[in-house]
Image (spheres, rainbow, N blue to C red):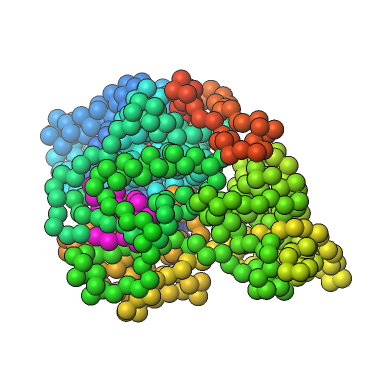
Amino acid sequence: MNKVAFSSWNGKVVDNRDEKAAKTVAVNLPAPGGEVATMMGWSGLVAKDSKADIPSLTFNYLREARKVSCGECSVCMIGIDRLLDIIGQMADGKGSKADLSEMQGIVKQVSANSKCSFGQSALFPVLDAVKYYKADFAALISGEKKLNGKEYRSEVTAPCMDACPAGLDIPGYIELIKNNRFEESLKLIRRDCVLPGVIGRTCTHPCEDACVRKNIDESLSIRLLKRAAADFDLAQGAKPFGAPAQQKEEKVAIIGAGPAGLAAACQLRLKGYGVTIFESLPHAGGMAAVGIPDYRLPADVLTHEIDLIKRMGVEIKLNTKIEKLTIKDLKQEGYSALFVAVGAHQGNRIGVEGEDEGYEGFVDGVKFLRDMNLGTKIQSAGKVMIVGGGNVALDCARSCVRLGFKKVEIIYRRSLAEMPASNEEIEGATEEGVSIRFLAVPVKIIAKDGKVTGAECIKMKLGNPDESGRKRPVPVKGSEFTVKTDMIIAAIGQRPELPAMDKKVGTTAWGTIQADPVTLATEMEGVFAGGDCVTGPATLIEALDMGNRAAEGIDSYLRGNNPAEKVSFAGVELAKQRGQGLVVKGPATEVAFLDPNKRVGGFGEVEGGFIAADAMKEAQRCLRCYRVVVWEKTV
């Protein structure tokens, strides 16, 4: 048998006696809770231990790969079954040396003839196992070695899944849509995303940036496919969430009915806990309800998905602001744990002269959107200037267009390349007549008789990158200029307004709560926190994911269990593979958008969704880039 362990990754083979060379292969391997001793994945294998049992590792890898094989083209499924049979026969003493040649031939045939990315790439590490550990397989055939029967750790991911903050099984739900199984697709989505219609409209879709098709033709329209599953369900009458299998005695309180709070409530209710959400606003939904205009997220979609959560037995108490948290009072009310998910609803100061004078016409962007979404009548003016470059600034600008402002201008201190707003929002604003002034910032508010009349501004230039990684804007001396405007909306970020607490809870310099990154537990016994009040302003899907994790952390706390180990593949290049079959190029399926001329004066939804046939057509473009990883840690 081999006395030396070899590693292969992306075709690079290393003798691990060469420590420096070995590190080039083993770098960035997933090491959940400890160092990886042996690992097999879609692009090779790593064996840092000379005693590594490669035949057993290969057998377990194939068993996990078999679970992912869909059988639609049958090549992959039949090939994996045969490989498992061969190794099983070897372990039973019925193998022969010819089996190794057959194994190599099967891998090559499956890789050449499979229709999806998984089948084309999943079996390549088997070739390396047979080539570099032939003596180990020979020992299995001769009876000198047996399969160890050990339970290896495994994970299934994909480039898109790894990029998704909530880790949704994207290839899985897309495949179900492709086969006209919308109801099953939605059920799979809801496992980790309790607001599919909301996220299907508002998500910043980092999954699409990671899509392998991006380098072939166009990324898959993953966000719109998620929306298609939710819209199909709504059109069919809406299926409720499943009921908890068993009712538990404990009750959990949640402060904040935003995406984080709603996700935690839904997941906890499915586990059988009684759940009550306390919400200070007259509507549930958090920033999804009061921070996103109807043209992006129709209110009835959000209301429908919240109603489904309420029908599970989750109680939501609106217009109930918790000013102070007292653990003693919490327990007297019968709650065993608390999740703080108050969001970040306070706008940041922009730091200009005159912003604290209370001038009429100077408005905080978050408050502007909240008032508008809650039905407060906003009087339009001639010109409005929005300060900022994020999605809140764009939402304010596009809303002003619809409210009848004659001229809408965004002023942003950096260039377009650094603008944090999504490309879709920037393009939509431009189509609707919003102008954007780059590399400038206001330094003083000009007012007359207590009303805003303009702003003194200064031009900026970009210097060295700051802590955000973007180039720092630097004022240009002597470049001051004046802009006349009737209203200024400040939209440069938000911060949370935290309730007072009877015991110390750690906070950051940004005023956010410090929570354990895995369990989301705070320093206060039984108190957890997540969402924007922990991360600062983030996306809805990130907040929703924290709600999912909080539910797991609370459940582990109440059951007295250790939290589930989190597997991270950060740094591993999931998109790489050593084989890529023929892919027929084809553009993404398009959806209709509301004519820009018809958007002014109303808040009708701008982006149309897929009809079922178009969703199925788009789903066919998925390459099904699942990546199976099986590993063993050092003791």
Q: Looking at the rendering, which quadrant does residue 65 occupy?
A: top left
Q: Is residue 36 visible?
A: no
| Residue 94 screen position, x and y as percent | 14, 30
| Residue 290 screen position, x and y as percent | 50, 52
- Front-most of 68 and 207? 207
| Residue 82 screen position, x and y as percent | 25, 26
Q: Is residue 81 magenta?
A: no
- Front-most of 517 and 295? 295
Q: Is residue 268 magenta?
A: yes
Horizontal side of 225 relative to 332 (left or right) equals: right
Q: Looking at the rendering, which quadrant does residue 181 occupy?
A: top left
Image vertical order of residue 68 relative to residue 163, above or below: above
- Front-most of 220 and 144? 220
* Residue sitting at x 85%, y 64%: 481
The magenta segment: 252-270
Image vertical order of residue 33 relative to residue 135, above or below: below
| Residue 564 screen position, x and y as percent | 26, 57
| Quadrant including the C terminus | bottom left
Image vertical order of residue 318 relative to residue 398, above or below: below
* Residue sitting at x 40%, y 24%: 178
Horizontal side of 167 relative to 299 (left or right) equals: left
Q: Is residue 113 visible?
A: yes
Farthest right residue in view: 478
Looking at the image, how many numbered discs can be counted on the residues? 0
* Residue sitting at x 32%, y 37%: 188
